[in-house]
Image (cartoon, helix red, strand yellow):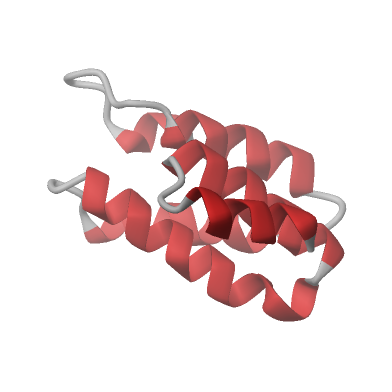
């Protein structure tokens, strides 16, 4: 996949770029999607030191929905919101 090759050539991608690649893989190569989703979650956790288990469960739920064509667009919109830089006091739970 060209997008994956480009990301590797660039080196470190942003969390937003990684999410877009993850969403693309969910649609085009679902057999590889789980690993991409796990990598994105790791990136998110690196940027959110105070994440709770509830936050992770919520993100995993939305990541799973990316693989469902009926829920892909809605899940991607929610995850894009989660990938934005967090403003102080904005809990992830508000993304439900």
Q: Closest to the observer: 92 or 32? A: 32
Give how far across and how far down residue 76 sits, in percent: 65, 41
Give how far across and how far down residue 25 sits, in percent: 73, 62
Q: Look at 25% across and 61% down and name the residue there.
A: 53
Q: Look at 51% across and 48% down and name the residue there.
A: 10
Q: Residue furthest bottom?
A: 31
The quarter in which the N terminus is drawn is bottom right
Say which quarter of the image contains residue 20. top right
Q: Residue furthest front?
A: 9
Q: Residue furthest left?
A: 50
Please indicate whether residue 24 sits to the left or right of residue 16 in the image. right
Q: Closest to the observer: 74 or 48? A: 48
How many numbered circles are shown? 0
Give how far across and how far down residue 30 sits, in percent: 78, 72
Q: Is residue 91 above or below residue 24?
A: above
Q: Is residue 62 visible?
A: no
Q: Is residue 68 above or below residue 84?
A: below
Please indicate whether residue 88 sits to the left or right of residue 41 in the image. left
Q: Closest to the observer: 58 or 37? A: 37
Q: Look at 34% across and 62% down and name the residue there.
A: 42
Q: Closest to the observer: 60 or 43? A: 43
Q: Is residue 86 above or below residue 78?
A: above
Q: Is residue 7 visible?
A: yes
Please indicate whether residue 57 sits to the left or right of residue 60 in the image. left
Give how far across and how far down residue 28 sits, in percent: 85, 63
């Amino acid at each position: 996949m060209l997008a994956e090759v480009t990301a590797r050539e660039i080196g470190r991608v942003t969390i937003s770029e990684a999410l877009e690649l993850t969403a693309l893989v969910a649609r085009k190569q679902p057999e590889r999607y789980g690993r991409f989703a796990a990598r994105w979650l790791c990136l998110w956790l690196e940027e959110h030191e105070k994440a709770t288990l509830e936050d992770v469960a919520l993100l995993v739920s939305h990541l799973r929905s990316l693989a469902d064509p009926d829920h892909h667009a809605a899940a991607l919109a929610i995850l894009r919101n989660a990938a934005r830089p967090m403003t102080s006091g904005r809990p992830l739970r508000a993304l439900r």
